[in-house]
Amino acid sequence: MKIPFADFTPMHNEVRAEITQAFKDVYESNRFIRGKCCASFEQNFAEYCSVPFCIGCGNGLDALHIILRAAGIGAGDEVIVPAQTFIATALAVSYAGAKPVLVDIEPDYYALDPEKLEAAITSRTKAIIMVHLYGQIGRFEEVSSIAKKYNLMLIEDAAQAHGALYKGRKAGSLGDAAGFSFYPGKNLGALGDAGTICTQSQELAEKARMLCNYGSRRKYEHEYKGFNSRLDEMQAAFLDLKLKHLDRWIKDRTRIAVRYLEGIKNPLIKLPKVNPHSSHTWHIFPILVEHREQLKEWLDMHEIGYQVHYPCALHEHKAYSELGYIKQEFPVASRCATQEISLPIFYGMTVEQIDYIIETINRFEVSNK
């Protein structure tokens, strides 16, 4: 049986007629930037996340970058980020002119470790970015308590956590601001790049909206040296119609994850843990295995797709060698980088596909060759 890592076909077949109609509507409107579709999605996604303000932008990296800029964070400032995440989290800090300061992740939920957080705070620290890695929220309350203690801005990188809950509250509504990505592979994915900024702050929202649009509130009047990062009408229309199905799609991913958690019994495999205070949206189903290359060969042999998220911790990238961290400095992040492998999890997977993956994983053994 051949199983891809991801397959959008079941999802997109269900919404094909809606997607086609949305394309026609936008195409015939002759309005492709900053029109009614973007306004509608911003309002609906704000309501979904339980926040008063949502600003569409070009992608998730832009969302985080513009949040930092709107907050006045820049040269000479430091922003704490987890040592294991996609590089965009750190790049946003660098683009703002600030310095990313890394903190290890905790071994259960792969989020910032609050027990290691305070040691990284200095007089130059202005913000903490907490990444909801793989689709669930970690020990947010503890991180938030530290942020308040030191009067630091707390930003959510919610790029993988659309719809996740923490103690009944939605991702995107927990911190001072949140950045979302709608890259096509996300649980709520556009048909291209797209992102949003969510916040409770009217002041930050107004400045962020201007920064996304060349620093302008009114055409040809520029209050800031802004950027061109706008959610276009076509992607907004697609996202708006997909948003109506998101919770159902997440429920199906949970069905698959529960079957994995119950069925995979191989002692060589470390399964992900679910935070009892958080609902996991299962953007990624990550497992850890010491002999990852052998498992990859085994999965290849059985035609099961997989990916690795992410093979380099942030301090191991050449792009951030100037930070001066040593390889052993963040042991949990480095262990995840060398051991993590993501199993297929996508809407519409059949029981036969899931069981075949479970059976294949359970038969995996380490070779001494």
Image: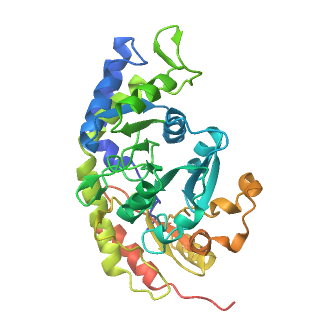
Total number of numbered discs in the rendering: 0
Nearer the observer, 120 or 97: 120
- How far across and how far down the image is residue 257, in percent? 33, 68
- How far across and how far down the image is residue 40, in percent? 28, 26
Compared to residue 32, the image places residue 359 above or below, namely below
Q: Quadrant of residue 217?
A: top left
Nearer the observer, 88 or 126: 126
Could one spot residue 30 in this view of the protein?
A: yes
Q: Quadrant of residue 298?
A: bottom right
Q: How is the image coloured?
A: rainbow
- Residue occupying the far top of the picture: 220
From the viewer's perspective, is 81 left or right of 41?
right
Q: Quadrant of residue 338?
A: bottom right
Could one spot residue 6 in this view of the protein?
A: no
Compared to residue 9, the image places residue 21 above or below, namely above
Nearer the observer, 162 or 353: 162
- How far across and how far down the image is residue 135, in percent? 39, 58
From the viewer's perspective, is 20 left or right of 197?
left
Quadrant holding the N terminus: bottom left
Residue found 42% across the figure and 50% down from its top:
158
Residue found 43% across the figure and 41% down from its top:
182
Residue found 22% across the figure and 57% down from its top:
168
Quadrant holding the C terminus: bottom right
From the viewer's perspective, is 55 left or right of 96?
left
- How far across and how far down the image is residue 2, in percent? 46, 65
